[in-house]
Image (cartoon, rainbow, N blue to C red):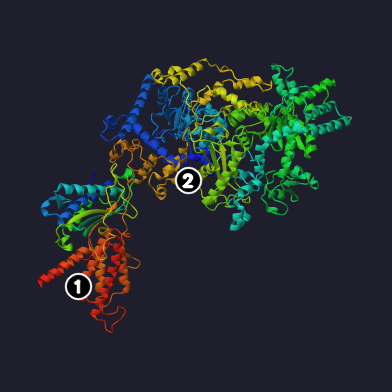
Amino acid sequence: MPRLTQESSHSSDYFDDDPEFLKAIAEIQLPAIADEPELLSSAEPPRAQRPKPLEDEPPRTQKRLRSPEDDFEDDDGAHYHNVLNAVDANDDESLNSYTYGASRFGEFGEYMTRKRAKLQIQNAELEDDEDVQGGEAAPKSRIFQGLQIYINGWTEPSVQDLRKMIVQHGGIFHPYLDKKSLVTHIITCSLTPAKIREFKHMKVVRPEWLVKSIDAGTLLPWQEYIFRPGERVEDTQGRKVAQKSLSSTFVSQAPRANLSKPVPERPDTPMQVDEADLDPAAQHVAGLSKPPVYTIVSPPRTPKKQTVLSPLKSGPTTPSRHLYITDPSTPEEADRIPGYAALKSNPHAERAMADPAWRAAHTSVAPDFIEGYYKNSRLHHLSTWKAELKNLVAEAQERAENGGVDAWQKMASEIGAGAEGEASASASQTAVNRIVQENLGGRGLGSGDVSMRGAKLVKRAPGNAKGKGKEKEKAADEERVIMHCDFDSFFVSAGLIDRPHLRGKPVVVCHSQGGTGGGSSTSEIASASYEARKFGIKGGMSLQQARKLCPTVLTIPYEFQRYKQFSLQFYTILMAHADDLQAVSVDEALIDVTSSVARIRTELAERLESSDDPSDPAKDFAESIRAQVKKVTGCEVSIGIAHNIMLSRLASRRAKPAGSYHLRAEDVAEFLAPLDIDDLHGFGYSARQKAAEKLGTTNLGELTKKSKATLCDSLGKGSGETLYKALRGVDERQLESDKPRKSVSCDINYGIRFKNNEQAETFVYQMAEEVSRRLKSIDMRGRSLTLKILVRDPSAPVEAPKFLGHGVCEAYNKQTPLIAPGGRATSDEKVIGEHAWRLLKSFNFDPKELRGIGIQIQKLEKASGPQETELGQAVLPFKRVEADMVAPPRIDVQPPSQEDDIEIIEKPVPADPVDLPSFSQVDMSVFDALPEDLRKELEAEFSKRRSVTPQAGPAPKEPSPVPEAGPSKKLLVRGVNVKRITQQLAPRNRPLVSPSKNLFAKRVYASSVNVTERELRKYGIDPEVFAALPREVQREQLAAHRTPGVTLYTGPGERKVLKPTAYRGKRSSKSPGFVFRPPPAPKAVFVERPTLKQQGKEKGEKLCFSETEDVQGVIEAWVEAFRESAPNARDVEYFAKFLVQSVDGARASDAGVERAVAVVKWWLVLLRRYFGAWEHEQQQQQPGERPGRITSEYVGRAWWRAFKEVKEKMDVAARKKFGGCLSLK
Amino acid sequence: MAAHASLTFNQAVRGVAEFIEVAIHTILYVRQVYPAELFVRRRKYDTPVFQSRHPALNEYIAGAVRAITDELALGTLDKVVMVIKTADEKPLERFIFAVRNTLEVESFNKDTSVEGAISVVSLGQYFRSFLVKLNMIEAQLGQMYLDDLSFAILIELQDDKAPTATNGKDPPPWIPANSQQTTSGAAENAELHMVRAVDTGIINLALAVQESEQKLNLNKELEQKGKGKAV
């Protein structure tokens, strides 16, 4: 695909896939607007430059990026409206008679046209009726004006009611969806998977939108009523990408949309507008108290949004935060990096790339590139480790339980001894030591239950629950002790173990070593020691930047093996103490140590020591853990303690370096007050931006004062709520000890430099191999593949500032179902490679511009599933049951054999992708006609449904090996979960049997209409967009552009659109919906005639002769001029060339032969006239010989010789086509 | 459809095929392949033409032209050749209808006026001039002295193409031609007379007559005989 510039249009595909891209576009547009502040203040819609639509044309409510595509839509809409207006006006007799007249034979196309017109007349009548009933007092509601709505399938309320609502409130109801570009919204309650795909780029809304809008008396934003098919439990399992992106599209354009809000240009409104602009808050108020006229036509936005009229994304209020990465991929990121010149090319890279040998050896073209890439990529190690953490944790578990017995015991006793040695050891410390010893010894306090069973991570000591009734649950929650354990600059401290001489010096870990790279190294710093941090050096900076901050900074290399080893030890220790553990990363973990701490407390109590001991057992325990880790690994760990995850993370930040901090519930507010919103885990740059923009502050103390609704409004529902709770010290998240893997991917965005498509293809297949290997290593297969592509941003230099980095890029994503033969999920490298390559190819990027490729496989399934056996047959992708569960972390505690139990329970439920209608709705005649077994099955199902109540159902098998801890919770999940069943029964958005056809659906059109790209460009149509259009629309567009006299922009007053065109009779059967325009006329092709070119009388003038008479005239003049002398060889050549060309079938048409023969005949006539005597004379003289005196004989012979030569040449040429030779008779 | 509108693709195909049929009848008459009594005079393209009255002959010609039409619509046709041959299959004269499709039209556009093509009316006028010249071809070719003549209709396709148009289940009606009668089999000294050519912008058509070597030799023999007789 040619690069998309901001002016060019974008196929709607890209709208959803890529919010970043959209954002970029939105921002590109903005400065232009910002340049004209007057424009802004007068709230003039940028569209004002466009020709004003007629008054009665409903303003478009949907603001989208302007693109040629949209223009078409608009015009279609306008076009259509004109038809409708004509119908409304009801004054055009001919039209009416046309509409209701009889269809003539063969004019099938009129049928739909008329039907549509009639329905619109009906609608108009509906509206009129209402007018009459409502009397003159009721003003007509126009809240739906501009909406063109199509209703799909069964809805609640019914289609009829909805239609009435739409029509009565000024909308247009479309009974048919044959012209998608007309329809602005689709209303539905349920969609089939096929339709979900079909409508995925459209605005699909639930009917409540209309109902509520009418209730509210104003058009509510449709985004809140987006229809989400079969709300999936797991986002990765085919979450509605399109729908999500629809809203994200909207959000990313929100600032722009605000600007382009259509303000009616009435003389009496400017005051209001001005007012609003002078004071945004006032506008807010005004918007509430006396809604301005435009709220009727544009979906009202939340007042908050309206107040932010600033076109600049951050504005002066929020200075953007510095970001430390070496290779930003978006311009915004680049902006945030101090000293990063995004547009500066890397001179070293340029030089290196100029050397083909170097290029072949070091870029993605190199055969072992991927291997090398992963060997050296820190991020890769971290991410794969994270994947391996599960195993790591299990290993640590094992060691803690078994091997630990002697080794750990030894350590435990050492600790104990150490503690006893300290005379001043506080009571709590003693207690801690005791518990630590017990933990390390692998023995719980008197409860055998704590002894390890299976591969469980949960070792909730029952003692913890003892004596705590339900009423105490909250208190218990408060008493939860979560520790966030984090190594202090892990890589550096691990590296310093071997390099004690570097301690206390500014040290960083990065690829670039010693002098190499020197001052200009772009190598990224992975970790910096605290000494280095004092200079301002941070992880993610480039070495170059760091050197600027601290010229003496020292570098040490990565030691991946060591990190792994330490990580294992770290986890082993944590495992010994934790009730539950969540592995965050190699050097970071969250542990639940509630029981241990509780035991310490009891211990304390048992010792009857003074309960007012100021020391904190939790903190002491943390210190003990720190000491243990330090002892084993030699590295410092910081531990934050709190009663939930969020706070423990905050606490660990306070604890650093090398310390621990207990954030108590009562201190939370005080602790949070000075912090910033992005200090909270899960809140980043964008949340901070939003908060700054919409709430005016990013300070947590300030934010605490905001209401929950305000927070939700500005940050979105989910994060708003999370923030609200977090501010109050509440975080209900559970530790996720074993998160199921959702996707497997392989991304490479370093060193991608291809020269051609072959290289790119090879590379993609190599990546596919890698992905496949990873899939196989976790024994999974995938059903969906996403290809992520980074393409160099047009404004970015060819060589990114980071050496071989990706630089500023445009990102593209595309997803495709991954189908192995037989419709199975797959992990086959070939299949993955093929799919990925096909996707990449479909983008049609210039391979030289590629900067990053990522292949991600989603919808994972266990490879050793039952599908394996059914080779060769397509398997309906019924969702496996375990994938359905909301996956409360406890569930995973069960031994794997439990899965089978769950499945058995599910079996009686028919796994039908379509939900059954209620029994009363079943057509009994159909029902009776069903085969008996089928009928029985249905009956059984219906009766079961009648009886099933949410918690009842077949008794689940008692999960025997589950410890008594929390069995009730598990039971709940194992019982028949009606919600889950309905979810399973609901139509799913996954393709059922042959999704592969979607693969090709996109590009198939390209060839369907015969048109060159150049022609399209001439018409101002982007070929990309054109190719994506449906075939009918393509033709329509082409016809409109090609047919002379028919302009695309038909003025509103014209009503002739419904008239049958001269062409219709012939074509109507082809495209009944598209009768408005004649098809493109093919152009006649004439073979270019050979011409005889001559210098004109005037200088520079060229004469071209092609007509027989003209050429004959030239020949005659020539012969006349040379009657007394032999013809010039060059002249002969000149005529010969023309004549031969004329008779050559490959170069001229047969009319040329005709002409040439006529010319030669005339030549013959002339020669005979003047030199007739010598026509049949035998050649007596050699041609080159010149007689002493020029005789007429000599001249005549020369002429005949020339004639015969030319004739000979012509014969040879003509023979190719006709054989033989030309007759001059 | 207005007569002055430019041709559609289908019109061009039908027009050319129709002309070929008319021309074949005319040639049979003009070259005296069959006795003149067999023909009836009619008007076509505003010019008098002669049409065979023999049903079997007409059937054969019509069938051949139908098959030609199918191939013509496919655009793979290069020449239609009507060979006048002796009883022993020796070609005497080859009437070559050279066609060339210059334009490929999408199926939905076959009935759309082709922009820039000549009109229906002028195509008829061109055909008229074809026939007028054809009627006077004797001036160039001389009289046919031989009895027992026969004729065949050949098509020559563009390189590497085979006749593909089929009607229902029947195989394409064409069989390989006698190579002597084809263009590639024509001798070097065979003489080609260009009758007329027209570029419609859709299908270019030219009519040429080729006198075969055999005929030229025959004529020479006859001339010598005649001379001998005269002497």
Please identify the quadrant where the C terminus of chain A is shown. Answer: bottom left
User: Which residue is at the far top?
Assistant: A947
Label whose residue precedes the other's in the sequence (1 or 2): 2
Query: At numbered mark 2, what does the secondary structure look like: helix, strand or loop?
Result: loop
| On screen, residue A232 above or below A1040 | above
Q: Nearer the viewer, residue A335 or A826?
A: A826
Q: Are circles 1 and 2 on residues that touch, CB within 8 Å?
A: no
User: Which residue is at the far front?
Assistant: B88
Q: Nearer the viewer, residue A79 or A1113?
A: A1113
Whether residue A673 is visible: no
Residue B122 point in image, percent of width and height: 22, 52
Residue on which disc 2 sits: A8
Q: Give the distance between the C-alpha atoms of the residues marked 1 and 2, in whole angstroms.
A: 68 Å
Whether residue B156 is visible: yes
Mark 2, chain letter?
A
Query: At numbered mark 1, what does the secondary structure look like: helix, strand or loop?
Result: helix
Residue A933 point in image, percent of width and height: 45, 20
Which amino acid type corresponds to the residue marked 2 in the rendered image? Ser
The answer to which quarter of the image holds residue A581 is top right
Left or right: A1097 in relation to A1003: left
Mark 1, chain letter?
A
Residue on which disc 1 sits: A1169
Residue A310 point in image, percent of width and height: 56, 38
Q: Nearer the viewer, residue A86 or A184?
A: A184
Q: Nearer the viewer, residue B43 or A52?
A: B43
Left or right: A407 in relation to B10: right
Query: Label 1 crowding class (10 Å Cα cut-off): few <14, some 14-19, many 20+?
Result: few
Q: Nearer the viewer, mark 1 or mark 2?
A: 1
Residue A823 point in image, percent of width and height: 50, 36
Which amino acid type corresponds to the residue marked 1 in the rendered image? Arg
